[in-house]
Amino acid sequence: MFSRKEKILLAVLACIQFSSIVDFMIMMPLGPQLMRIFQISPHQFGLLVSSYTFAASISGFFAAFFMDKFDRKQSLLFFFVGFSLGTIACALSPNYEVLLFSRGLTGIFGGVLSSLVMSIVSDAISYERRGSAMGVIMTSFSMASVLGVPLSLWLANQFNWHAPFLFLGVGSLVLCGVIWAYIPSMRAHLLERRPRQPFYSVLTNIATNQNQRRALYFMSAVMFGHFAIIPFVSPTLVANVGLREDQLPLMYIIGGLCTIFTSPFIGRLSDRFGKHRIFLIGALVTLIPYTLITHMKPSPLWLILAICAFFFVSSGGRMIPATALVSGTSRPENRGSFMSIVSCVQQLAAAISSYIAGVVVTKGASGRLENYEIVGYVAISFTFVAIYLSRRISAIEQKPQEEIQPLVEPAF
């Protein structure tokens, strides 16, 4: 299905996504440890999570004004170097306040990476095969769950919470060299001569495009519901359900192992049966683990792990057709800008929902986290909103594969 060059490109992009996802995901399982060490409330921990996403949304917004003016490879290198240095700054943070600032700094660079990766995939892979390509990229989430998070937690338990950030930051700097060596120059979107437009045309073009506006509303709804749940999964499992901190890696390992197999499969289903249909099925299925996780009582370990694996598979699976669908609403010449705005609204929705969840969820006198079920109802409601909006999005990029010209300049 993919050529050798495309496989190498997708592998490197998946590694970039892996680093970005681990950097973000590690905050959740470290939640119980950070809340105990810094003696912070659920609200303050919610700020740690949302500081990254707030900063990412701001950087995604401003990046949209220049993203399509540069070689995508050069942009990717710039932001990934900044992300790597920001992660090292997190590792060197001596207290809560500095860590909060460092998370925001990392978010400024990390928030643009996802839109860059998706832009590169969309430029290089035709729409008819893009679901499969997104499935490959989404396996980075699986590997982050199977390898990245458990290894990070092991480093935190063996040394301290600084260790996983230091390891990830240094590893990401090494990956910058791989990007320079193996990602080809991507300038095809610069070759077409277009009339000069004012800088704010990026926004006005989207504002006047009903299809793209719906795509933004759609992704906002998907992310708002999801990130109302995500930040407090680990803290709630520890405080309410009886999972021990040293058992948290099992949740990520088992969930990640399941998604390694399901993500590429769901990507192929999206290409075969349509992105709309597969997203609808995935979104409806996700309602089940949303309800179970937010209402869970003390349970056997096997049941906790089974529910969490179900959550990983369904929530991660629906993002594959969702991302492919949204990527098809823009053309190559303005895709980088549009995907930056998409990243902006995604991160903003995630930040707002994480913050609201931090306000709603409170710690009781017994140490239990209260009101998590309310967060679950919010997530379920926004899932139905996302389903409605998804039916009103049309992909404009559906040319037969033989008509699509290569968008990547040869570099091998």
Image (spheres, helix red, strand yellow):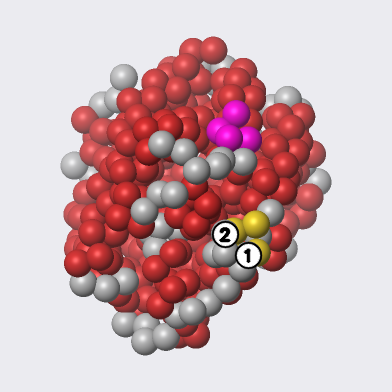
> Badge 2 is on which residue?
368
Quarter of the figure with the N terminus:
top left
At a point 39% along the width and 68% down the height, the residue shown is 33
Is residue 18 in view?
A: no
Pick the front one: 198 or 369: 369
Q: Give the structural element (helix, strand or loop) at label 1.
A: loop
Lateral position of residue 172 relative to residue 394, left or right: left
CA gap between label 2 and label 1 equals 5 Å
Asked if the magenta segment contains residue 79, the reply would be no
Most common secondary structure along the magenta stretch: helix
The three-letter amino acid code for the residue at tag 1 is Gly
Residue 38 visible in image: yes
Of residues 330 and 156, which is closer to you in this image? 156
What amino acid does circle 2 point to?
Arg
- Asked which secondary structure carries label 2, the reply is loop
Where is the C terminus found, in terms of image quarters? Answer: top left
Instruction: Give me the disc on residue 364.
Output: 1
Where is residue 90? Give x, y as percent. Answer: 37, 76
Please tell me which residue is depicted at 42% across the width and 85% down the height of the picture: 95
Residue 262: x, y in percent?
39, 25
Q: Residues within 10 Å of mark 2 (few under 14, many from 20)?
A: some
The residue under the point 32% across, 82% down is 92
Eyeballing the image, is 64 above or below 243?
A: below
* Range covered by the magenta-colored residues: 288-292
